[in-house]
Amino acid sequence: EDQVTQSPEALRLQEGESSSLNCSYTVSGLRGLFWYRQDPGKGPEFLFTLYSAGEEKEKERLKATLTKKESFLHITAPKPEDSATYLCAVQAHFNKFYFGSGTKLNVKP
Amino acid sequence: DGGITQSPKYLFRKEGQNVTLSCEQNLNHDAMYWYRQDPGQGLRLIYYSQIVNDFQKGDIAEGYSVSREKKESFPLTVTSAQKNPTAFYLCASSDFGQSITGELFFGEGSRLTVL
């Protein structure tokens, strides 16, 4: 069964304390893995696309990596404004996206 | 600026009423989607459309209907047959091109509450 699992469900960090969020997936025919940021009451904001194992993408304090079974979103020296829910999604077939339930990140000053 | 506009942002409905959520995009994307988001769950696909005048059911289409008369517009009607309509609804679009791979771009969402 195709599915996407994110862990942890919630993560509390002190400002400057680096950590990683995990997205594991079991889908056949991976076409792309996507990371989104979602603020409360808002739509998801696109962050990264990863297509193949070994690929890495960076944006400010965020770095996304991909293996054959999972992806990590590394957050280096986070700031309070990084607090949000981070969603992972996998495109398995044309027009078929599977979403994880998200990791809620809270960065304390 | 290009983007996806959803309206209304908040909507209250009495039981037994149909309501329509609007979704308009000016990104010139062919594909459009409707997702439902409930607390603690991943986004679930309601309907999607790859081209004008064509759409397909997603995983949770029962109690919903859509139309795609224009490329820019993909309204969703939540009918009285939907047993638990209170949720956050998200519209998205994508431009796959020749690669048939591409990220989804989302609107700001519409929160529907049934009284």
Image (cartoon, coloured by chain):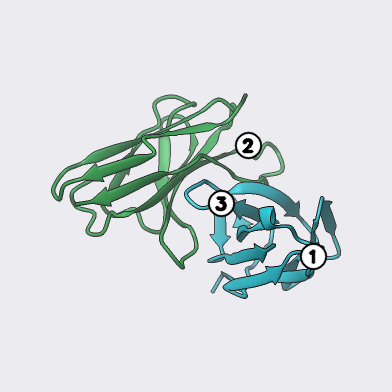
Chain colours: A cyan, B green
Comes first in the chain, label 1 or label 3: 1
A90 with respect to B84 (left or right):
right
The residue to which callout 1 is attached is A16
The percent coordinates of residue B104 (x first, y second) are 60, 45
Q: Which mark is residue A108?
A: none
Query: Which callout, 3 or 2, points to the residue nearer the camera?
Result: 3
Q: Are marks 1 and 2 on the same chain?
A: no
**Residue in view at x 62 percent, y 68 percent:** A27
In the rendered view, would you say B106 is above or below A54? above
- Disc 3 and disc 2: Cα gap in Å? 24 Å
In the image, residue B47 lies at what x, y percent? 41, 47
Screen quadrant of the C terminus of chain A: bottom right
Query: Would residue B15 appear left or right of B94 to someone viewing this image?
Result: left
Residue picked out by circle 2:
B95
**What numbered label is drawn on residue A39?**
3
Q: Numbered disc 2: what chain?
A: B
Cα separation between marks 1 and 2: 37 Å
Q: Secondary structure at mark 3?
A: loop
Residue A63 vs residue A90, the one in the foreground: A63
Nearer to me, B12 or A18: A18
Mark 1, mark 3: which one is toward the viewer?
Answer: 1
Q: Is residue A4 left or right of residue B62?
A: right
Residue A25 appears anywhere in the view: no
**Which element type, helix, strand or loop, lies under badge 1?**
loop
Quadrant placement of the N terminus of chain A: bottom right
Residues marked 1 and 2 touching at CB (< 8 Å): no
Q: Residue at x 56, y 56 (%)?
A: A97
Among the 4 quarters of the image, the one containing residue A82: bottom right
